[in-house]
Image (spheres, rainbow, N blue to C red):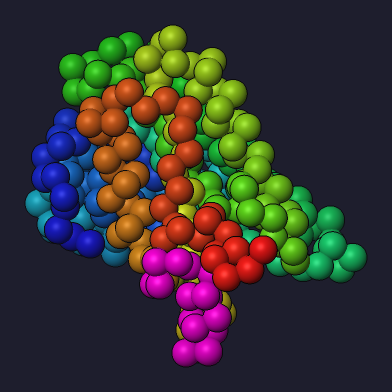
Amino acid sequence: MNTPSSPGRLTGQNALVTGANSGIGEGIARELAAQGSNVVVNYVVQPDVAQKVCDDINAAGGGKATAIQADVSKEDQVQAMFAEAIKQFGTLDIVCSNAGIQRDAKLVDMTLEQWNQVIGVNLTGAFLCAREAAREFTRRGMRDVSKALGKIIFTSSVHQEIPWAGHCNYATTKGGIMQLMESIAQELAPQKIRVNSVCPGAIETAINRKAWDTPQAAAALEKLIPYGRIGVAADIARVTAWLASDEADYIVGTSIYVDGGMTLYPGFATGG
Ligand code: BGC
């Protein structure tokens, strides 16, 4: 994780990563910093954990890290987070809208609260962070650190494409992120803002612990992954950092699936 594929590739840039005190977000924050970007580590709970991520990053000698609390589903908190980030770093060049939650239930059992919580964090949070990012990029204008005015990267999911029984709130938010991403990519590209998504498959983090933390569960999960291994946060982080870099300057409005082939419908390898 701490061996960047391209040290210095993001030097001089400033990034904000939501939900960065654990899982995929933490991996993205560490990788961006390892490649030279300063990074805001956003969190909602467990400030000590966010601070530990920042301490590690600051000790590692790449970009600098600062922890900022905000619940991304709340407009005032998102705006306060962006204001604080801009106060500390001067501006932002990369915004990774990554924070996401699951509140799983069958349709007939799903409460309105479970529905609203997931829509609030995963989809409204993505909208609010993208909007504040675009406002800041256009306010500030071009800088000589990147060919783009700014980059917005959503952490979506294979479930923007694969339906998911028992998780309709979550899958709905990921389908929504796809249309949000493509619509604003079309809207913002003329201003040289690149908007894209990374779509992880099954990545070993706390959100899906039940799906991999026993040998039986892991074996069942691997059947859904043609490449035969469960992903790790670094698999997503490296692609996200590359997508943020000028090496990906011509990638606009694209979803990159990083899923070991999960979206290849592996059941059809032997059936159909
Ligand atoms: C979900 C995980 C799940 C994975 C593959 C992700 O978006 O958050 O819980 O394991 O998709 O199904």
Give residue 14's position: percent from left, percent from top.
27, 34
Give residue 50's position: percent from left, percent from top.
36, 59
Q: Is residue 6 above or below residue 127?
A: below
Residue pushed farthest bottom? 215
Q: Is residue 247 above or below residue 161?
A: above
Q: Which residues are magenta?
A: 215-229
Q: Is residue 267 above or below residue 182?
A: below
Residue positioned 90% across, 65% down in the render: 108
Check the picture and name the quadrant holding the N terminus.
Answer: bottom left
Give residue 137's position: percent from left, percent from top.
39, 19
Residue 210 is covered by the magenta coloring: no
**3 with respect to 170 (left or right):** left
Asked if residue 118 shows in the view, the reply is no
Check the picture and name the quadrant holding the C terminus.
Answer: bottom right
**181 with respect to 11 (left or right):** right
Asked if residue 270 shows in the view, the reply is yes
Residue positioned 44% across, 16% down in the render: 189
**167 with respect to 78 (left or right):** right
